[in-house]
Image (cartoon, grey):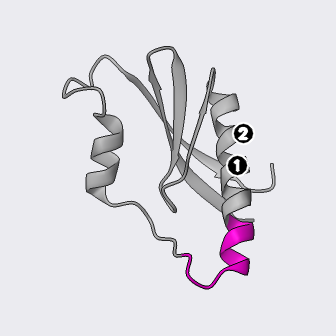
Amino acid sequence: MEFYTVVLRQSAGYWVSLCLENGLVGQGSNPEDSISKLKEAIESFQDVYEMETKVFKAPISIEELHEFLTVEGEDISSDIYELRKVYDNC
């Protein structure tokens, strides 16, 4: 069973989920909605990845993760974060 590592971030009244294995994101009004959108993005990406030869995927870098966590400023202590294991067949 394949899974993805997802970081969820709440900010400005919405949730954003970031997949660490491929850098895709989803956004929603709650964590579950955000993950659902992310799963849709992953599925769409996989379809394109399997059909196209010039599409690449790679895990995000530490710098990209840092940017995701601090996108609205350097003070990350006021935001809410979660780390989840998300299975692709859910």
Image: 21 above or below 13: below
Image: 82 above or below 65: above
* 52 is within the stretch colored magenta: yes
Q: Secondary structure at mark 2?
A: helix
Please name whichever residue, 47 or 87, is drawn nearer the observer in this view of the structure. 47
In this picture, which residue range is highlighted in magenta? 46-55
Taking the spot 80% from the left edge, 48% from the top edge, the residue there is: 90
Inspect the image, locate mark 1, and give the three-letter code of the amino acid beneath it: Lys
Instruction: State the residue position of label 2.
Output: 36
> What type of secondary structure mainly makes up the magenta span?
helix
Please name whichever residue, 20 or 47, is drawn nearer the observer in this view of the structure. 47
Q: Quadrant of residue 62?
A: bottom left
Taking the spot 63% from the left edge, 33% from the top edge, the residue there is: 34
Q: Secondary structure at mark 1?
A: helix
Q: Residue furthest left?
A: 74
- In the rendered structure, the answer to whether residue 46 lies left or right of residue 61 reads right
How busy is the neighbourhood of tag 1: few (under 14 within 10 Å), some, or many (20 plus)? many
* 48 is within the stretch colored magenta: yes
Q: Residue furthest right?
A: 89
Q: Are marks 1 and 2 in contact (CB under 8 Å)?
A: yes
Image position, residue 70 (x, y; %):
28, 34
Image: 8 above or below 79: below
- In the rendered structure, the answer to whether residue 89 lies left or right of residue 57 reads right
CA–CA distance in space, label 1 to label 2: 5 Å
Inspect the image, locate mark 2, and give the three-letter code of the amino acid beneath it: Ser
Taking the spot 53% from the left edge, 47% from the top edge, the residue there is: 6
Q: Quadrant of residue 71?
A: top left
Instruction: State the residue position of label 1.
Output: 39
